[in-house]
Structure formats: C-alpha cells, structure tokens
Amino acid sequence: MSRRRVSAGRLLVLAWLGLPGIGLAAAPSPDAVRAVAEQAVHARFDLPGSRVVAQAAPLDPRLRLAPCGVPLRAVLADAIRPAPRLSVPVQCPQADGWTVRVQVQLQLFRAVLVTNRALLRGDGLRPADVHAEQRDVTRLGYGYVDNLDQVTGRSLARALPSGSLLTPAALAGRRMVSAGDHVQVMADLDGIVVRADGVALGSGDNGARLRVRNESSGKVVDAMVRAPGVVLALP
C-alpha cells in the first residue's frame, strides 16, 4: 500500500480521536477567506485613536479553491493607504498554494479638526477655534488635520465657515504677527507715513485684520498685517 493512501478504517479512528489525517486538508470556505482579508485590514489600520469597520465582499460563486493544509495568510504593506475599497490578497502559503484577491470595504474613523466658528483668510488658529469630530477619513480626499500641533502658529489661506473640516490646503504659512507681539504700526496720513510702536491684540498672516494698542497713548486701532511685525493702521 502506498504511504499516501489511508484506509477507511484509519480515517474513522483519526476522526474519532480528533487527530488530523494524512491528505485530509479541505478547501477553505468563502467565509474563512473573507475573514482573513478583514483581519488583515484591521491589523494594518487599527491603530490607537482609530476605529476600523471592514466588510469583505462575497467571493465569486464560480470560484473553486484547492484544499489548503496550512493557515491562510493576508498581509497589507505599510505603503497601502486607507481607501473606501481595498483589494486584499489572501494566500494559501504552501508549495502548490494559491492567491485570491478579496475586495474589502473600509471605513476608518479618526478624530479630525473642525472649525467652531466662521474664520477669515489670514486669521491665526487657536485651540478655541476648532474641535475634534470622528470622521471616516477614507472619504476625505483633500486630507485632514488631526493634531493641534499642526496648526500652532499657522494662519488660514482662505475663509472657512463654521463647521468646516480643516484641511492642509486651508493652512497658510506661520503667522506674521501673534497676539502680544510688539509691532510697528504704520499710518498713511495724506501721503505722509507715520510710524509708532504697538502691541498686537490678535494674530494673523499677511492681509489679516486685527486690533493693535498704541504703546504710547494706549489707544486701540484696527490694523492690517503687512509683513512680519509690521501692521498698517486702518482708517
């Protein structure tokens, strides 16, 4: 008798003992393949501060998988970015194994920053200007900001209504003037430029409007940021 052949009697004994038999590998079920794909997505994206919802699509009913005598394997590379739909390769990693791609729908919820109030172009961003909301970041094609450290000292490149998602494209450079800075206040009086020392009462980038207190008189005026540390008094 060939060593690869197993008698019916021995099969019954092995089954009764709960032991694996020679050549008894079975074809994995579609649900098992889908579960491995979902687990791979969770392993790749389920990081602290994130919530992953992964749903594998049904396999093609015409697909016939060969038996696999080892555990199935699916690994997503670190370079894979989160997207609403991922193609996950599930492998039977044996010498004569196979690979099948499983489509997995992904939702990846993370805390992102949203504006608390309407903000103008050039406004500097403060912690009180934003709050965190859970959003599915796979749907945020223009990116998102999830950390206050990313906006410290930054101003807005465009106006944003209240409740707007803060994106990298909405951020301009670092603020030219911050609240409390000592600034030079310029005023154009009929063609004559007058300069005075002041203290900024707000923050902003070039073109931003803010209030400035004259250090000598204590008078507060409206001004516009013109350069780092320089503002133009408005009439």
Image (spheres, rainbow, N blue to C red):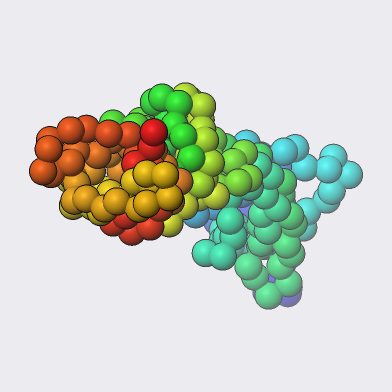
Between 232 and 131, the one nearer to me in the picture: 232
Q: Is residue 43 visible?
A: no
Between 141 and 179, the one nearer to me in the picture: 179
How far from the left and from the top, in percent, is residue 221?
A: 27, 34
* Above or below for 115 versus 197: above
How far from the left and from the top, in percent, is residue 25?
A: 66, 57
* Above or below for 88 versus 134: below
Total labels: the figure holds 0
Q: Which quarter of the figure has residue 210? A: top left
Most extreme residue toward the right, as rendered?
62
Please report the residue visible at 33 percent of the width from the left and 59 percent of the height from the top.
228
How far from the left and from the top, in percent, is residue 114?
A: 44, 32
How far from the left and from the top, in percent, is residue 22?
A: 63, 63
Q: Answer left or right for 127 relative to 141.
A: left
Q: Which quarter of the figure has residue 71? A: bottom right
Please report the residue visible at 65 percent of the width from the left and 70 percent of the height from the top.
94
- Position of the C terminus, as image quadrant, is top left
Q: Answer left or right for 69 relative to 62.
A: left
Between 149 and 87, the one nearer to me in the picture: 149
Please report the residue visible at 58 percent of the width from the left and 56 percent of the height from the top.
81
Q: Is residue 62 visible?
A: yes
Please report the residue visible at 72 percent of the width from the left and 38 percent of the height from the top.
57
- Position of the N terminus, as image quadrant, is bottom right
